[in-house]
Each structure stands twice: as structure tokens, then as C-alpha cells.
Image (cartoon, grey):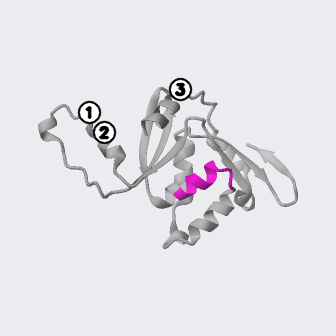
Amino acid sequence: LEWLMAEAFHAFDKPPFVPAELARIPLEDWEHAKVIFQPSVSIFHSPWPVLDIWKERKNPDRNQTRVVDQKTPQHILIGRQETRVRCELLSPAQYKLLEGLLRGRTLGEVCEDLSELEGGEDLPVAAWFSRWVADGLVVSCKIKRPDNISCSL
């Protein structure tokens, strides 16, 4: 986790995706979209609550250290906003979505995988994506439709 945080801090991020560009993407093209994230963005999964443990290190009163449940796995999004590295807990579904997108899969492919999860049809994927765009974590969307027409936003 700390290594990924250091990489995020030192990454050379690009100008973020402009949310107004989303309106230019026809609804039927979204399934073919490949989302490109900032170089500082990564994800991390641990069977232990590593983010909770990492945050606890800053507790100035070691006598008041809270007990961290050792059996709590965590999925974590790491990225940078300006000069601050952020770590955010993700749900397993959010992690699966980001994992697929970071591997270069299309939004349609990843959403199809998510639909197989229990409750996968009702996931707020658009809200997650909108927040990541608003947070500046997305650089662009590349769309290659089946008719071989491509565009980049």
C-alpha cells in the first residue's frame, strides 16, 4: 500500500477529463468505452484491514489505539488530487469495476461481469464514474464501436 502511495505521489498526472465531454458520448456508445485513468491511480486488495492499520499509525496517543478487526479485507483506491495522495475504501463491486477498466477492458465488458454479482443489476456505476471524473481521476475515454469508427474524448 505504501509503495503504491509513493508511486501515486510521484506520478506525472495529465489534465483531467472534462465532465462536459460526457454529453458528447451517445448512450449506445458507452458499452464500447475504454476509460483511461490518471497515472497516479491504482487499486489494492488485502485480506487484512491495511488502510485502517496505516491510518492508526498517526494516532498520537498509543494508549488510545483502537482495535482493528484483523479479519476485515479491504479494497482500496489510490490516487492523487493535486499534491495529496488519497486512499479510499471501495466496495468489492467498485473494485471489480476499476480492476477491469484499469486492465483496458470496455465499460460494457466490465458491467456484464458486474451484472453476474448478487445485486449487480442495481449498482450505481454511473454515480461512481461521475465521482471519479469529478475527482479528476479520469483522463479520457476511448470508444471503438463495432463499425470500426473510433473516437477519443
Q: Which residue is mark 3?
A: 10
Residue 111 in percent (x, y) is at 62, 63
Which residue is depicted at the point 26% across and 54% down?
69
- Say which residue appears at 22% left-offset and 35% top-offset: 59
Residue annotated with mark 1: 58
Relative to 149, is 127 on the left or the right? left
Left or right: where 70 falls relative to 80: left
Position in image of residue 37 (x %, y %)? 61, 42
Instruction: Kindly indicate whether the residue at mark 2 contacts the one at mark 1 (C-beta within 8 angstroms).
Output: yes
Where disc 3 sits, the SS reads: helix
Which residue is at a point 33% across and 57% down the rendered structure image? 72
Within-10-Å neighbours for mark 3: few <14, some 14–19, many 20+? some
First of labels 2, 3 by sequence position:
3
Which amino acid, by three-letter code, is at mark 3?
Answer: His
Q: Position of residue 42 (x, y in %)?
A: 54, 42
Residue occupied by mark 2: 55
